[in-house]
Image: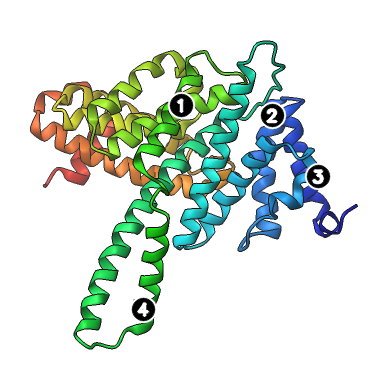
């Protein structure tokens, strides 16, 4: 046993071994679900509530140094670290490298599997796990863009204060260092590269997936692509990304957060394209499903294991915020086009619109 292995808690080593086994050998869905949505959260709370999980080198022996599994482990633990800290510029650059390494390894295995006579090693990850990866990828892209814009604005203001002779050298130095790192990593989170990976992964949803994991990631890459195009303001492209999902709807519907993301960004796109009836129908339907989920405890209940590695509180807060946004969008749609009221057939949703926005 190596010195590094000896330092790791036994439950953590068992977790990595069992998670790898569920992904590469046993493919038992309930086992992986318990590990991903339950045990990861418990171990995090016990050992790593405010710190990073062990490095891939530390756990490599527990999974036979499987490079793709280690890339998945790295993304999972990076996502945890990103959620408990306030990421600075180097953390965000590191995040970009984590996702590039994972997607490059996925594409490498797919390319190897496509060669004649190649033996494919199966890989299975839960639909929830696949969605979390793709959702976080676009989330961190969005966060990086906002961080870069804010940093550039702050650096410009600090430079003006320095020219005026105001004291602020420490802050100015920190901002200059941040801008230097951004300048030397211009390729980090580049829009065209983010879109490149999403489009490459989407292909796996069309029947060209070498493993079940590739297929699930391909399906949820399509959900992420719809979100990405909406963020970029290309609303037709957003709907184009959504339309083929009809064929994979059974997989998408197993992850409520994916349904929510899909409907929200499609609804925004319909609204911006002045397709008011489609916007009302799409947003009204998902709002109705949300009200049922709140009422039954599917969202907001004590025992619900949700996305983000089982971080139910994060998921619940986000779901309620998106619900409020969609109610506001429905208020706009019904005001601009009153005829759309007839497409909202859930009285609870209609009541919410009137209560929250009836006087506006």
Mark 2 closeness class: few <14, some 14–19, many ≥20 residues within 10 Å: few
Position of residue 199 in the picture relative to residue 240 (left or right)? right
Q: Position of residue 278 (x, y in %)?
A: 22, 22
Q: Residue at x 21, y 77 (%)?
A: 160
Disc on res. 171: 4
Q: Position of residue 25 (x, y in %)?
A: 76, 26
Mark 4 closeness class: few <14, some 14–19, many ≥20 residues within 10 Å: few
Contact between labelled residues 4 and 3, with CB atoms less than 8 Å apart: no
Q: Nearer the viewer, mark 4 or mark 2?
A: 4
Say what secondary structure mark 1 lies in: helix
| Disc with the residue nearer the chain's start (4 vs 2) | 2
Q: How is the image coloured?
A: rainbow
Q: Nearer the viewer, mark 2 or mark 3?
A: 3
On screen, 122 above or below 137? Answer: above
- For disc 2, the marked residue is 30
| Disc with the residue nearer the chain's start (3 vs 4) | 3
- In this rendered view, identify the residue nearer to me: 98 or 347: 98
Q: Label 1 vs label 2: CA separation?
A: 29 Å
- For disc 1, the marked residue is 200
């Amino acid at each position: 046993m190596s010195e590094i292995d000896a330092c790791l808690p036994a439950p953590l080593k068992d977790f990595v071994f069992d998670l790898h086994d569920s992904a590469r050998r046993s493919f038992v869905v309930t086992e992986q679900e318990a590990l991903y949505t339950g045990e990861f959260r418990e171990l995090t709370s016990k050992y790593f509530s405010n710190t990073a999980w062990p490095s891939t080198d530390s756990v490599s022996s527990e999974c036979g140094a499987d490079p793709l599994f280690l890339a998945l482990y790295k993304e999972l633990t990076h996502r945890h670290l990103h959620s408990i800290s306030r990421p600075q510029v180097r953390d965000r650059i590191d995040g970009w490298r984590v996702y590039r390494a994972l997607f490059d390894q996925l594409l490498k295995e797919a390319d190897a599997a496509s060669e004649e006579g190649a033996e494919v090693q199966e890989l299975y990850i839960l639909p929830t796990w696949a969605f979390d990866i793709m959702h976080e990828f676009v989330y961190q892209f969005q966060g990086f863009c906002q961080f870069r814009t804010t940093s550039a604005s702050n650096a410009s203001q600090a430079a003006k204060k320095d020219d005026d002779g105001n004291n602020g050298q420490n802050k100015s130095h920190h901002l200059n260092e941040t801008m230097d790192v951004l300048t030397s990593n211009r390729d980090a989170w580049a829009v065209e590269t983010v879109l490149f990976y999403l489009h490459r992964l989407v292909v796996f949803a069309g029947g060209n997936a070498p493993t079940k994991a590739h297929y699930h990631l391909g399906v949820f890459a399509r959900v992420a692509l719809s979100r990405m195009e909406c963020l970029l303001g290309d609303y037709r492209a957003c709907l184009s990304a959504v339309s083929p999902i009809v064929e994979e709807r059974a997989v998408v519907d197993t992850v409520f957060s994916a349904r929510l993301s899909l409907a929200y960004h499609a609804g925004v796109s319909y609204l911006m394209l002045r397709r008011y009836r489609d916007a009302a129908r799409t947003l009204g339907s998902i709002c109705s499903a949300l009200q049922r989920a709140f009422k039954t405890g599917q969202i907001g209940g004590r025992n619900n294991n949700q996305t983000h590695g089982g971080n139910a509180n994060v998921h619940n807060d986000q779901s309620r915020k998106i619900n409020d946004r969609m109610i506001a969008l429905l208020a706009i749609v019904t005001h601009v086009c009153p005829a759309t009221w007839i497409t909202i057939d859930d009285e609870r949703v209609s009541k919410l619109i009137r209560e929250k926005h009836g006087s506006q």
